[in-house]
Image (cartoon, rainbow, N blue to C red):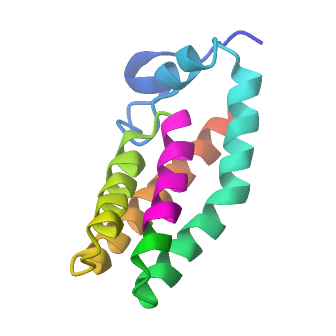
Amino acid sequence: MKSTIPTRSGGDPRWGDTLNVKDALERLGNDEELLRDIIQIYLEDSPAMIERIHAAVAAADANDLQRAAHSLKGLAATLSAAEVVGVAQRLEHIGASRNLTDAGSAVEDVDGRVAELNEAVQAFLRRK
């Protein structure tokens, strides 16, 4: 199905870099149905990814933090969710460095950005 979503600022000016619908659709061959399917996968899988990030930080498990953050980054990149990609990449680098000093603040950042992305994807799904 071809997209009928407006393209200005990714489809909704409130979303900014939270969810760039235009870019995501271009990446997916302008297949809005596929984007909706990927959003559903994101909504199903991201809570476990976030929980895994929290658990890795609590356990000071740098390897698992790196892997969980990488998974979240990849899924967010498919949605062109630049803000989540950025904080997930930050967490991935923290895990790779094995120095978790900044992990707590990065987890707070990812929680906030994911909450914003969740609002944006829910709003997108409500559109006809």
Tell me the residue at 38%/24% (across/down): 9
Extreme residue in the bottom direction: 59
Tell me the residue at 74%/45% (across/down): 40
Q: Is residue 78 above or below residue 99?
A: above
Q: Is residue 46 above or below residue 76?
A: below
Tell me the residue at 50%/72% (across/down): 64
Specify the quadrant that holds the N terminus.
top right
Along the horizontal axis of the image, is 35 left or right of 75? right
Q: Nearer the viewer, residue 77 or 117?
A: 77
Q: Nearer the viewer, residue 124 or 1?
A: 1
Tell me the residue at 41%/43% (across/down): 18
In the image, residue 100 lies in the stretch drawn in magenta: no
- Residue 53 seen in the figure: yes
- Residue 128 seen in the figure: no
In the image, residue 74 lies in the stretch drawn in magenta: yes
Along the horizontal axis of the image, is 21 left or right of 39? left
Q: Nearer the viewer, residue 111 or 48?
A: 48
Q: Residue 107, position in %: x, y? A: 37, 72
Quadrant in which residue 95 is drawn: bottom left
Along the horizontal axis of the image, is 60 left or right of 49? left
Q: Residue 62, position in %: x, y? A: 39, 75
Specify the quadrant that holds the C terminus.
top right
Looking at the rendered structure, the number of numbered marks drawn on it comes to 0
**SS majority, magenta:** helix
Which span of residues is magenta-colored? 66-78
Q: Is residue 100 above or below residue 17?
A: below
Q: Residue 54, position in %: x, y? A: 48, 79
Q: Residue 93, position in %: x, y? A: 30, 59
